[in-house]
Image (tube, rainbow, N blue to C red):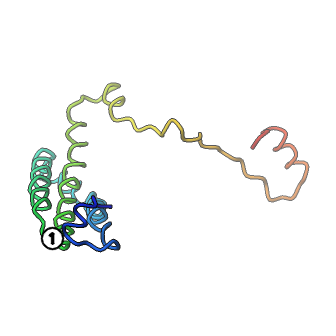
Amino acid sequence: MLVPTVVDALEIPAASATWPASAFSLVISCFLLPMGRLSDMYGGKRLFVIGVGWLVICSIVAGMARTELMLDLARAMQGLGPAAFLPSSVMLLGSVYRPGPRKNLVSRVEPSPRAPPPRVRRTIPDSGDRKSVRRLERDNPGS
C-alpha cells in the first residue's frame, strides 16, 4: 500500500494503490533466475554494479512520477535492479571465501528457530496384518 500523501497527490484510486508495490516484487520474482544466468555468463561484479545503478536511476524516476501509470512503470523497472544484484551479490560473497568450514558457515541456510522440526513417519504395511501394525506402533511410539 502506498503512502496516503502519494495516493492523494497522484489521485490514485484505492483499488490501484497496491500496484506499485506489487509490480516491484512481481518483476523481481520473474527476473531473478534469468539475471542469475546473466550474472554467471558476464560476471557478478558487472551485473551487481549495473543492478544498483539501475535501481538508483529508476528510483529517481519514480520519485518524479506525475501520473499513476508513470509510478507503476517506474516501480516495475526498479524491480530489474534487485533482480540483477541479488544473485550476483551471492556470487560475489561466495567468491570471497576459500572452500572450507568458514565458507560453509557463511553460506549455510538454516530454518527459522520457531519452525517445528520435520517429522518422519513410517508407512504402515498394506498387508492388513494387525500383528505387524501393532508391532510398528509399539516400536515407534508417537509416530
The correct choice, above or below, for 12 with respect to 111 in the image is below
Q: Is residue 142 left or right of residue 97?
A: right
Quadrant in which residue 15 is drawn:
bottom left
Q: Position of residue 106 (x, y in %)?
A: 32, 31
Provide residue 101's location: percent of width, then percent of height.
35, 25
Image vertical order of residue 95 relative to residue 36, above or below? above
* Quadrant hosting residue 45: top left
Q: Pointer 1: what residue?
A: 70
Q: Which quadrant of the figure contains the C terminus?
A: top right
* Residue at the image point whose x is 40% and y is 38% from the top: 109
Disc 1 element? helix
Going by the numbered disc 1, the residue's amino acid type is: Met
Residue lying at 22% horizontally and 62% vertically, measured from the top left: 6
Q: How many marks?
A: 1
Question: In screen coordinates, is 12 left or right of 59?
Answer: right
Q: Quadrant of residue 129?
A: bottom right
